[in-house]
Amino acid sequence: MNISNEEFRLNQILKGAVNGITKKEILSRFSEQKRELIEMILSEKELRHDLIILDDRYFHITNTNYRVGVFKDKKYNNRFILIGNDMYTLAGDTSAIDGDTVLVSIVNTRPKVAKIEKTIERKITDVYGDVEMIKDDYYLRPENPKFQKLKIKLNNNSNIIVGSKVVVELGEETSENHYDGVITAVIGNSTDAGIDILMEAYKYGIENYFSEEARVEADNLPLSVSDKDKIGRCDLTDKQVFTIDGDDTKDIDDAISLEVLENGNYKLGVHITDVTHYVEKGSALDQDAYNKGTSSYLAGKVIPMYPSIFSNGIGSLNPNVDRLTLTCEMEIDSRGNVVKYNIFPSVINSNKQMTYKNVNDVIKGNDIPEGYEEFVETLKSMYKLSLILRRNRLSRGALDIDREELKIELDENGMPIEFQKRIQDDAENLIEEFMLIANETVAKSLASKNYPAMYRVHDTPSGAKVQEFINLLNKIGMPYYRHDKYDLQKEMQLIGNELKKYGEVGKAMLLPFLKTLKKANYSIDNIGHFGLASKEYVHFTSPIRRYPDNTIHRAIKKYILSDEVHTDEEIDEDLFELDQAAFQSSEREKLADRCELAIVAMKTAEYMEKHIGEKFTGRIIQIDSKGITVQLDNLIEGRVKISSLPCPYEFNEDTLSLVAIDDDYEDFYYGDLVEVEVYDANKENKTIEFEITDILEQNKYINPSVNDDCRNQAIVKEVSKVKRKDKRRTKWNS
């Protein structure tokens, strides 16, 4: 008889003993040979809390008033216990922390109320916060309010500094909620500029430090390119090659060159820094980069994938010094088709580190910036080629999404002082087009021979989701018909173009439009890239900032540039490794994106804390039953609670609007331009709360009080049941 059978029999005994049973009585039910085994099972059940011991009698937990649940401590004092799928209100106070597994006694079943008797398991292992001193001992003051009930004593040593932001691993619980702790990471000093960004990044697993082994490897890398390094590489140091980046860019991945051929075609060179020449696969530097997955650019602060001594040094394509590169050279015809290409190792010497701002001046025919005179013709030819490439890309169905991004300017103390829209002008578009065509060309080269590679893929959106968005457009007064003759690729492109016709109101719909799309990720299965309308696409052009690009560089060297014959077993091993790396890179990218959003929310709230009571202009970009989201001209977003509106409002699902019950007040629609006052802002909670003080411009495409004809054009099956009366403008600030 195996253990599971013994356990089944033991369960039956415990469940049948409604009034409990002693250990002696339990053991008497089994043969002497089985009693040691039964005692072991009883101990395991006690640890799992399948049974409860009261006055030396064993009870199956279902025969008692006790249960095991999970304590939840949400915002705004919303605390409860989750037992299975049932939610119980907490009776009394508790020392438990959000996420703890707890033993509870049921106080009431209708309504459901339970009292926590003790904490069974505390899952948290790391806590972050500030070092403080209490009576000659060092303690951690946790930053997270949920953990501030913990008393964490730190091991005294000479390296502990009061005021440091640290991460602490919890040791033994010396008494209830009292712990010994060991510092595992020092993020910085609480007074350092940008320490809040680094702490927020740490919460998402984005660490601003490298292993000791990686730092040693970086310190031992050469500072300049040797003659030995140039052997076997094409020497392009006499060619006109340059870089175009932001004003403050220090880690430069890519350089470009261009020749106009006699046949009228263009010979475009995209030269990418050869990171994998210096970073060996499996090395400490490579392992750290693999774990990070990507560099993170967080409100002006960079958390690099490689140590700056490398990423800003010999790994960066700095001007007037030799650098090792991988070059993708393409001959492109007047229609934007790559008719010939070559991928090879090279050496370049960048003639100039250009900036987007200065290149835009050249393209637009403004005054030529000093030092750009000899590059004017090349830059104009590059601009012409970029327009050709863009036209070709759009002609095959690529999406043209021009979503504005937020740029945060911080002062020397890390405080936000200005928020601006990030400019995507001609020079930025030029570089983007050149990088896109290089990535696509490299992908085609690998795919044509079925070589192992990590692709950047973007799956086709769900047809149902696309139809939902079309229904949404119709509801808010932007009539759109589905084209049966077009596939989703063309349909989504047309929808994107349609939004542009509505100007600022159309921009308010970009976020829900993007949500209809699936998220791009990395995969060894080449399913194509929907957004770019590309059959093959990889990331090749940013090996300093993205780990996947390094896998492509290694694939190029192993399969394209080498004459070696590779066995099926070797290829399978590469595919297995790439599959793991693709998953890791995709997950790290998601974390970096989430962290970036969290830091933007934190910094915008911090900025608005100093502007409470001030008025701003913004546009409504979301409406639901709980309120309104308003995006200001500087792209900062805040919420307007429905309870803060001047009269009762109802949410109309047919038009996705808030309808005033009192006819003296206006309704609210997607895209309305409003004046708001900052009512509240909280950096810690990352929240901004507005109150609407005036309606400056109503969405004429749906609001019948502005344009009765527009509403009639919408393709809405459901007819709004709300009877509209003539509205008169009300002074919201009266």
Image (cartoon, grey):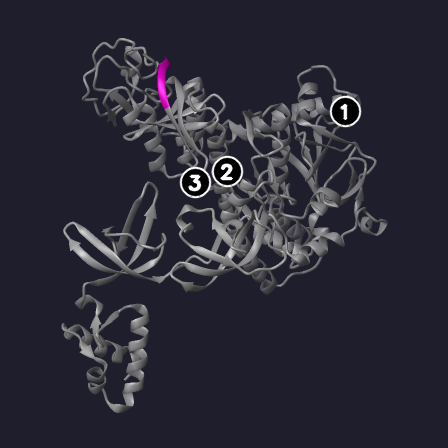
Tag 3 and tag 2, C-beta contact below 8 Å: no
Q: Is residue 67 rendered to the left or right of residue 395? A: left
- Quadrant of the frame with the N terminus: bottom left
Amino acid type of the residue tagged 1 in the rendering: Phe
Residue 66: give x, y in percent of width and height.
22, 63
Q: Which mark is residue 178?
A: none
Magenta residues, start to end = 691-699
Depth check, mark 2 against mark 1: the one in front is 2
Q: Disc 1 on helix, strand or loop?
A: helix
Mark 1 lies on residue: 375
Label 2 – label 1 distance at C-alpha: 39 Å
Q: Residue furthest bottom?
A: 32
- Residue 8 spot, x, y in % from top left: 23, 76
Q: Residue 353, position in %: x, y?
A: 74, 31
Three-letter amino acid code of the residue under disc 2: Ile
Which mark, by number, is residue 518? 3
Task: Using the image, determine if residue 713 lies above or below residue 280.
Answer: above
